[in-house]
Image (tube, rainbow, N blue to C red):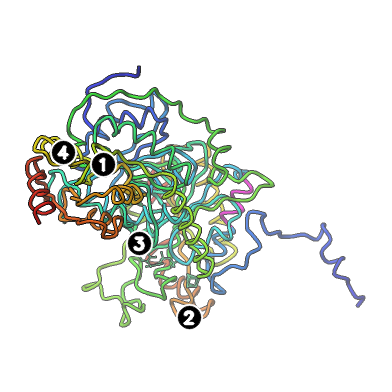
């Protein structure tokens, strides 16, 4: 049995980074996720594991510190919230181009602009469709509990190094701020310098005599070579789509109507399933864990099972719903429901939307 | 006169100069007469002479020297425009025993990257910054830089830099010298053999400071030419640089061993 604690989601992210054997965290304060860097600074992991923690001058600097350290083979992490994540997009695009492994979290708040500090899921498009410039993807994990905030840091680093890709933990203000019981995984020791060099032969760790130099870059001025590089990236994303889909199906076996949701919206929709079932409506919930890769095949399976309608539930004006539509290919009606701009929907509102828009509509 | 064979000329005892192994054989992409190539050579010779090549990681900027990693035969990371000091910070913080340097132009370091430059200097990151100040944006075709002199013409100040509208040139080197985080700040040039020798001494001191873990950042500005951007022949460009750039950006040490000397 691991270490049992009562923690905020943001604190779980921070503690998990230390336990996952991260070498460095670079961040910049922003609500609702400032507890991540506050926890780390109070915890002094440089004394516990040798992990570096640095408050950067901006999110732009923080992501570029991540770029530098990740390019040198180390396990690095940063976190922020929506306006700060927008600033990181340039760096994330470079990280995608140069194929660097890293983990970062977005504890989403309402937007656009400075928006609000209340929870939101309106950064879905930015997270799964690219965000920065160029044809690229990143793995997006959507925690629905404080437990998953911790677990996905560890999983995130595994996936990041397996594919040399950025892994985004897409949380929201509720998951970041709420306190829950967490069973913390056992600490993984940081790699020694020798292990870092051996495991990441591509990393800039100093060119030994008689060896080829390593170059971390996203640049290739020759268009045909750049096309080849892009093809290589796309092939990698395909492998990820085939192997790394994660989701949870709740009461879906006999479901006639399925809610599709992730993160806090999935927690809320789970209650809506209960309310629906108590009224005799056969409802289920498909909780998405990976947003990229999107669990399209799972949705198609339920189409074949004869699902009569889908309701995409998200705290946005309707973003994930587009991917649901693409996945189910018109097999049944797809509608969207969600409060947004920082307002959280209730389970009753969600059920009402199912009855009005999907069943009755 | 007897014919001298090629073999006789190139025999080892006649060797007076050899290209460092730390420069690749790739043809430089710089315009003939440009100072970038000489600056590359000086840095690579210093790293070789100090025996640091196996432990050095360089950071290339965005600018004409974006392809510096094609020429510098060591491990290199290419940074986004202006972000090199943050990238170098990331590398140095996780590999404190490695030697890390950035190589940046004036647009990169003193315009888009001002924040990263000032904060890396202010934190006293134990890295070396080499700053090539040619008073213009070379890569993109000769636009005005933060360092463009008052009255100086560029493609975005075609009638000369009007300081009332465009602001004054930024002496970022003097600015960062006043920060407690900088340990060594100097301004050099590489347009004559004498200047190259001095510049090399300065670059060497900068790398020695880092190797010896002296407290703070070592910053070497190299005032250089951009004959293409300035629309001059290489010789005219160097003369113009002496007559106009040096009075505004005077050469010499500004801060040595953590103490202001100017
Ligand atoms: C974010 C971003 N903005 C603008 C550019 C275009 N750009 C490329 S190089 C450059 C200026 C470089 O000038 P400088 O740093 O002085 O270096 P030089 O080319 O003179 O050596 C600009 C504006 C870019 N690549 N990225
Ligand atoms: S454009 Fe200017 S800075 Fe760039 S290579 Fe040519 S002379 Fe050098």
The residue wearing badge 2 is: B232
> How far apart are labels 2 and 4 at the CA level?
75 Å
Give the label on residue A263, or none: none
Foreground disc of the pair 1, 4: 4
Crowdedness of circle 1 by 10 Å Cα count: few (<14), some, many (20+)? many
Residue A301, x across and y down, in percent: 33, 48
Q: In the orientation shown, which residue stands out farthest toward the bottom? A: B159
Please provide the residue range marked out in magenta. Answer: B42-50
Q: Secondary structure under badge 1?
A: strand
Q: Secondary structure under badge 3?
A: loop
Q: Secondary structure under badge 4?
A: helix
Residue B149, x across and y down, in percent: 34, 71
The verdict on residue B39 being magenta is no
Foreground disc of the pair 3, 1: 1
Q: Residue at x 42, y 30 (%)?
A: A21
Foreground disc of the pair 1, 2: 1
The residue wearing badge 4 is: A273
Against A321, residue A196 (above or below) is above
Crowdedness of circle 4 by 10 Å Cα count: few (<14), some, many (20+)? many
Foreground disc of the pair 4, 3: 4
Q: Residue at x 35, y 32 (%)?
A: A17
Is residue A81 toward the left or the right of residue B180 in the image? left
> How far apart are labels 4 and 3 at the CA level?
39 Å
């Amino acid at each position: 049995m691991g270490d049992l604690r009562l923690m905020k989601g943001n604190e779980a992210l921070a503690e998990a980074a230390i336990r996952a054997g991260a070498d460095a965290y670079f961040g910049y304060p922003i609500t609702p996720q400032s507890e991540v860097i506050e926890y780390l600074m109070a915890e002094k992991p440089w004394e516990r594991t040798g992990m570096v923690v640095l408050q950067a001058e901006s999110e732009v600097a923080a992501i570029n510190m991540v770029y530098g350290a990740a390019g040198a083979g180390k396990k690095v992490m940063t976190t922020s919230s929506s306006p700060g994540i927008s600033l990181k997009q340039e760096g994330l695009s470079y990280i995608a181009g140069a194929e660097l492994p890293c983990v970062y979290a977005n504890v989403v708040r309402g937007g656009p602009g400075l928006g609000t500090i209340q929870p939101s899921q309106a950064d879905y498009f930015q997270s799964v469709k690219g965000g920065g410039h160029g044809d690229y993807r990143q793995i997006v994990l959507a925690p629905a509990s404080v437990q998953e905030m911790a677990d996905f840091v560890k999983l995130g680093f595994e996936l990041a190094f397996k594919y040399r890709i950025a892994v985004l933990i897409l949380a929201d203000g509720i998951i970041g701020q709420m306190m829950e019981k967490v069973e913390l995984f056992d600490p993984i020791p940081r790699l020694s310098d020798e292990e870092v060099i051996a495991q990441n032969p591509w990393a800039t760790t100093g060119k030994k005599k008689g060896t080829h130099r390593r170059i971390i870059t996203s640049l290739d001025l020759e268009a045909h070579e750049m096309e080849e590089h892009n093809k290589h990236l796309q092939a990698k994303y395909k492998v990820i789509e085939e192997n790394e889909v994660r989701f949870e199906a709740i009461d879906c076996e006999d479901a006639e109507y399925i809610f599709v949701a992730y993160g806090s919206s999935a927690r809320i929709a789970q209650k809506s399933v209960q309310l629906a079932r108590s009224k005799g409506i056969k409802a289920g919930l498909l909780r998405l864990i990976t947003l990229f890769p999107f669990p399209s095949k799972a949705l198609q399976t339920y189409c074949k099972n004869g699902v009569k309608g889908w309701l995409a539930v998200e705290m946005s004006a309707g973003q994930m719903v587009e991917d649901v539509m693409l996945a189910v290919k018109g097999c049944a009606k797809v509608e969207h429901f969600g409060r947004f701009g920082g307002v959280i929907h209730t389970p009753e509102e969600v059920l009402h939307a199912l009855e009005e828009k999907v069943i009755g509509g | 006169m007897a014919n001298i064979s090629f073999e006789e000329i190139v025999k080892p005892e006649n060797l007076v100069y050899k290209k460092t192994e730390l420069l690749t054989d790739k043809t430089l992409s710089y315009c003939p007469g440009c100072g970038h190539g000489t600056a590359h050579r000086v840095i690579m010779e210093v790293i070789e002479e100090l025996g640091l090549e196996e432990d050095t990681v360089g950071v290339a900027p965005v600018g004409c020297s974006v392809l510096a990693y094609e020429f510098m035969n060591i491990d290199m990371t290419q940074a986004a425009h202006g972000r090199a000091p943050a990238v170098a910070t990331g590398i140095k913080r996780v590999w404190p025993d490695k030697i890390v340097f950035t190589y940046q132009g004036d647009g990169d370091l003193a315009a888009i990257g001002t924040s990263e430059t000032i904060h890396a200097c202010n934190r006293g990151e134990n890295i070396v910054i080499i700053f090539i100040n040619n008073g213009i944006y070379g890569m993109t075709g000769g636009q005005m830089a933060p360092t463009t002199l008052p009255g100086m013409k560029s493609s975005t100040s075609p009638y000369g830099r009007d300081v009332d509208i465009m602001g004054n040139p930024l002496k970022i080197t003097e600015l960062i010298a006043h920060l407690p985080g900088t340990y060594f700040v100097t301004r050099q040039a590489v347009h004559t053999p004498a200047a190259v020798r001095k510049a090399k001494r300065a670059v060497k001191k900068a790398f020695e400071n880092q190797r010896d873990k002296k407290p703070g950042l070592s910053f070497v500005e190299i005032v250089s030419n951009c004959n293409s951007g300035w629309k001059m022949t290489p010789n005219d460009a160097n003369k113009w640089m002496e007559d106009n750039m040096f009075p505004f950006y005077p050469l010499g040490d500004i801060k040595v061993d953590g103490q202001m000397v100017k």
